[in-house]
Image: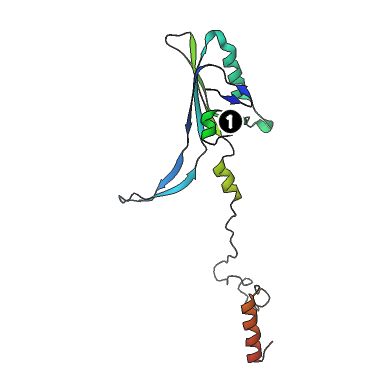
């Protein structure tokens, strides 16, 4: 298995990558035994990588630490393009290091057991959510004020009149003709 971050290979022995997708939900049962839940969205997918680096190859661990500590403008963690079969299968294209990097000494071998987590950046659910149009509020009023009116002053509604459909315009003309108004 290969793991590339911006084209740079994460080197070590026995690399294993685990992908995880968390689906957030909330309990709607209140104080009852109801099993209803509310879908709260998809959280960013994560990749957890584990590998072994022999003590004699300590430069590989230094390279990994350099990548984990890399930042971009503004001090933000560096975002990497990821190439890995598991990441590709989960649809993960961009990641950043998260939750730290751990290195512990192996009990029997002269090597470190390394584990780190990469979190997805700019996920597909995030892109979809960004493309959705927001449900805007058209009019709000305070207590005692008429909705769509001008502060409840009772001014003529013709000034704030909305556009009429073709049928409504025809009805207005007929009403005016029958009533002798406009």
* Relative height, residue 57 to residue 25 (above, below): above
Q: Is residue 25 above or below residue 120?
A: below
Front-most of residues 9 and 137? 9
Q: How many marks?
A: 1
Percent across and percent down for residue 102 are 50, 21
Dot 1 crowding, Cα within 10 Å, few <14, some 14–19, many 20+: many
In the rendered view, tell whether residue 118 sits above or below residue 53. below
Q: Is residue 112 above or below residue 134?
A: above
Q: Nearer the viewer, residue 97 or 170?
A: 170
For the residue pair 39 and 28, the one nearer the viewer reads as 39
Q: Residue at x 49, y 42 (%)?
A: 42
Q: Which residue is mark 1?
A: 96
Quarter of the image where the C terminus is located: bottom right
Where is residue 153? Give x, y as percent. 63, 75
The picture places residue 101, in percent across and down from the top left corner, at 53, 23
Residue at 66% x, 78% y: name it: 158
Residue 40: x, y in percent? 47, 47
Q: Is residue 181 left or right of residue 134?
A: right
Which colour scheme appears in the figure?
Answer: rainbow
Instruction: Describe the element under mark 1 as helix, strand or loop.
Output: strand
Q: Residue sitting at 54 percent across and 33 percent down?
A: 88
Q: Residue at x 42, y 8 (%)?
A: 108
């Amino acid at each position: 298995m290969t793991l590339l971050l911006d084209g740079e290979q994460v080197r070590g022995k026995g690399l294993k990558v685990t992908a995880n997708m968390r689906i957030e939900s909330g309990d709607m049962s209140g104080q009852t035994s109801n099993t209803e839940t509310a879908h709260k969205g998809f959280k960013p997918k994560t990749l957890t990588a584990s590998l072994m680096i022999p003590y004699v190859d300590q430069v590989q661990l230094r390279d990994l630490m350099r990548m984990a500590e890399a930042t971009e403008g503004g001090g933000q963690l560096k975002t990497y393009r990821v190439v890995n079969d598991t990441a590709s299968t989960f649809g993960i294209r961009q990641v950043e290091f998260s939750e730290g990097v751990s290195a512990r000494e192996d009990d029997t071998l002269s090597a470190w057991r390394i584990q780190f987590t990469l979190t997805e950046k700019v996920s597909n659910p995030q892109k979809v959510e960004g493309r959705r149009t927001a449900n805007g509020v058209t009019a709000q009023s305070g207590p005692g004020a008429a909705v769509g009116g001008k502060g409840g002053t009772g001014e003529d509604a013709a000034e704030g009149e909305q556009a009429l459909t073709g049928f409504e315009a025809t009805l207005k003309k007929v009403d005016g003709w029958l009533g002798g108004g406009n």
